[in-house]
Image: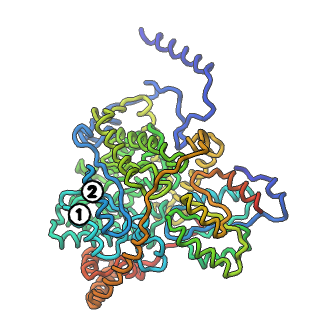
């Protein structure tokens, strides 16, 4: 009886729609997915709650990985910090904990990220600039001095030398009296996205992944609460990918790690629960939250059906989100506060487990204390004032959100097939498949901005000629000098015999293909530098160079 | 951005530009977009890639007989690395190449770099057309 009424209504709506004016910009997501003017139950053909949605905390986890999501525990507010020497970063860590932050997140400087010591010629000007400089275990001890490592969870964002830093961290923690079985935190340790996007790789893909697996294997046995890899789409997106590419390439990376662990003879249910993810939170609210929902559903399906994991915790995709640095503008930088707030809301509505909100001044400098505080306050407003935490997956069942979630999932699955056609992960890296896809998307985005098909407030519209500059953080340029001095001291004081003995052992272990972690804990204790440990391995594994596919 | 025929008619040969990243940062989204955009606008672009040592950059400028050198740096180490590079260019007899810089460069440093001989500095979000126009006006 009601059907003809509905179809009359629909007909009228279609007529009115055809006659109504539309704004000139095409209605697509930030990534270019076309969006219909309206979604109805017609779009959800064959929609079955049970299969596509399930209940929160249950397969396929579209609605979240916990039964009560943010009604129970809020996400961890984890602001990325680090600059100068370990002493300076330790002070910032304590400041953040005092302000109510609930986890630590360590930024390392570029030399450390590239496995170079502070006294390397290529490190000049970069020591302690974008993060903390770590050369030896002394720096690691100083970095976490006075912090209870069994209570505070620690995230370390580092990749090419991740296994070295992790070994140094565990050695420092154990020597400091902490129980490794109680250490909690996350190591980024995701080398694959470095080849796709962020460019902080050193060894070729195959040995690089072997070292990732070494960390997974070691931690599974000895540091069981540690999240061994943070499989990251964030940097892929920052390099200009679409949301679908971010999702697809990240999960493909995850699959590769899982397969390599299985190849090593590990049991999937022993390591899979400690794989975590890291996604970007970009401008398009619905595209982003649909992306997270699709991510959970895809991963659950892969883990359960492709890799035959039995434990529910192996099926759950848990993720950290960070608002999109690449969306921030240097024009009218205070407007970035609003961008960050909406992006953070997408991450929370999408069910994130932890979140970093960028500071408004990040296109200009490292965050000032004022800007960093506002970024944290943004999360606190979201958590305590907006009401978005009151119910689980509030947008689940929306015609639009469910359709978009399906579309994103389907397009990601098409990418999985294309990667297969390129003969798998390593071959696709070596032939430049990922870099080409991402580069094309980045270029298309810039063209759309230049043509004003995409409006960026303050950049290609709503400009403001007489802007007042923001007060920025003044970097203490003495960090480099201080770090060089203390490194020189350490090199003088340490025992040459210990250095030789432990590095010889590291070399032997690496050549035989055994797990390098225990040997690295000994180089750490002999105060062998990160750069020296990496150098030993580079002589064995070689250095990767980008081919024609830049 | 299709190839513009008019850009080819301006003189006998397209302007030649070497693009390179110096220092350790791997942020190459911007420089790759610029490389492609300039190529599509008829420039002859040589992209030297990531982590270039100053000596290698200077060599590329000479080898390629470049009119322009475009340096991208987003790590904040520009005031350490760029003055050295500019000195080296002069010492090696390539002091007449015009230098532009892209990246996160604070206002105060832009003036210092210009005094050191940098012709143009472009921040994030600069439209492609602005860079093209800038290069054409100063050929």
- Compared with A331, A472 (above or below) is below
- Compared with A525, A327 (above or below) is above
| Chain designation of label 1 | A
Position of residue A467 measured from the top left corner of the image (x, y, whole percent)? 56, 46
| Residue A274 numbered tag | 2
Q: Residue at x 66, y 75 (%)?
A: B60
- Compared with A516, A42 (above or below) is above
Give the number of callouts. 2
Position of residue A142 measured from the top left corner of the image (x, y, whole percent)? 26, 70
Q: Quadrant of residue B42?
A: bottom right
Position of residue A232 measured from the top left corner of the image (x, y, whole percent)? 40, 56
Q: Residue at x 62, y 57 (%)?
A: B122
Q: Residue at x 41, y 67 (%)?
A: A476
Disc 1/disc 2 C-alpha distance (Å)? 8 Å
| Chain designation of label 2 | A
| Residue A367 numbered tag | none
| Disc nearer the start of the sequence (1/2) | 1
| Residue A220 numbered tag | 1
């Amino acid at each position: 009886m009601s059907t003809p009424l509905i179809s009359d209504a629909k007909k009228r709506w279609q007529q009115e729609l055809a006659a109504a004016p539309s704004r000139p910009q095409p209605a697509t997501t930030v990534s270019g997915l076309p969006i219909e003017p309206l979604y109805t139950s017609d779009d959800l053909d064959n929609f079955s709650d049970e299969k596509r949605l399930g209940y929160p905390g249950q397969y396929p986890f579209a609605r979240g990985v916990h039964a009560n999501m943010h009604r129970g525990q809020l996400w961890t507010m984890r602001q990325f910090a680090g600059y100068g020497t370990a002493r300076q970063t330790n002070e910032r860590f304590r400041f953040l904990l005092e302000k109510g932050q609930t986890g630590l997140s360590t930024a390392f400087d570029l030399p450390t990220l590239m496995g170079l010591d502070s006294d390397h010629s290529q490190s000049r000007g970069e020591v302690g600039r974008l993060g903390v400089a770590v050369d030896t275990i002394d720096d690691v001890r100083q970095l976490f001095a006075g912090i209870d490592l069994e209570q505070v969870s620690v995230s370390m964002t580092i990749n090419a030398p991740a296994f070295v830093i992790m070994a140094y961290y565990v050695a420092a923690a154990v020597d400091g009296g902490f129980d490794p079985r109680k250490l909690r935190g996350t190591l980024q340790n995701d080398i694959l996205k470095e080849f796709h996007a962020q460019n902080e790789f050193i060894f070729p893909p195959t040995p690089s992944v072997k070292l990732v697996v070494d960390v997974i294997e070691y931690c599974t046995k000895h540091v069981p609460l540690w999240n061994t890899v943070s499989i990251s789409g964030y940097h892929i997106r920052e390099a200009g990918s679409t949301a679908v590419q971010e999702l697809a390439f990240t999960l493909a990376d995850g699959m590769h790690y899982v397969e390599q662990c299985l190849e090593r003879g590990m049991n999937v249910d022993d390591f899979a629960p400690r794989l975590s993810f890291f996604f970007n939170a970009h401008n398009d609210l619905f595209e982003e939250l649909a992306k997270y929902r699709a991510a959970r559903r895809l991963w659950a399906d892969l883990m359960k059906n492709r890799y035959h994991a039995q434990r529910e915790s192996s099926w759950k995709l848990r993720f950290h989100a960070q608002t999109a640095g690449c969306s921030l503008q240097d024009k009218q930088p205070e407007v970035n506060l609003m961008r960050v707030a909406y992006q953070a809301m997408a991450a929370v509505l999408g069910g994130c487990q932890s979140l970093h909100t960028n500071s408004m001044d990040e296109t200009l400098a490292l965050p000032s204390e004022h800007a960093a505080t506002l970024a944290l306050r943004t999360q606190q407003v979201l958590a305590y004032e907006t009401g978005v935490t009151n119910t689980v997956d509030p947008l689940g069942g929306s015609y639009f959100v469910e359709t978009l979630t399906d579309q994103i999932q389907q397009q990601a699955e098409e990418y999985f097939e294309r990667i297969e056609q390129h003969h798998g992960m390593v071959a696709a890296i070596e032939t430049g498949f990922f870099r080409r896809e991402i580069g094309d998307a980045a270029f298309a985005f810039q063209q759309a901005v230049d043509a004003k098909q995409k409006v960026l407030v303050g950049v290609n519209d709503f400009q403001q000629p007489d802007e007042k500059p923001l007060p920025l953080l003044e970097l203490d340029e003495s960090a480099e000098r201080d770090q060089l001095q203390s490194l020189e001291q350490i090199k003088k004081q340490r025992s040459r015999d210990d250095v030789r003995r432990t590095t010889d052992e590291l070399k032997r272990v690496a050549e035989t293909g055994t797990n390098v972690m225990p040997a690295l804990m000994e180089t750490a204790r002999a105060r062998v530098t990160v750069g020296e440990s990496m150098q030993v391995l580079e002589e064995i594994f070689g250095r990767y160079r980008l081919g024609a596919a830049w | 951005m299709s190839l513009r025929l008019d850009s080819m008619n301006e003189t006998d040969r397209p302007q030649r530009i070497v693009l390179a990243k110096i220092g350790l940062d791997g942020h190459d989204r911007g420089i790759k977009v610029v490389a492609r955009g300039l190529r599509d606008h008829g420039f002859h672009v040589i992209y030297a890639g990531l982590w270039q040592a100053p000596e290698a950059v200077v060599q590329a400028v000479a080898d390629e007989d470049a009119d322009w050198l475009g340096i991208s740096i987003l790590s904040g180490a520009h005031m350490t690395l760029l003055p050295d590079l500019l000195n080296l260019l002069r010492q090696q007899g390539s002091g007449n190449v015009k230098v532009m810089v892209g990246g996160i460069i604070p206002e105060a440093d832009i003036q210092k770099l210009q005094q050191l001989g940098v012709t143009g500095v472009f921040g994030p979000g600069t439209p492609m057309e602005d860079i093209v126009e800038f290069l054409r006006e100063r050929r």
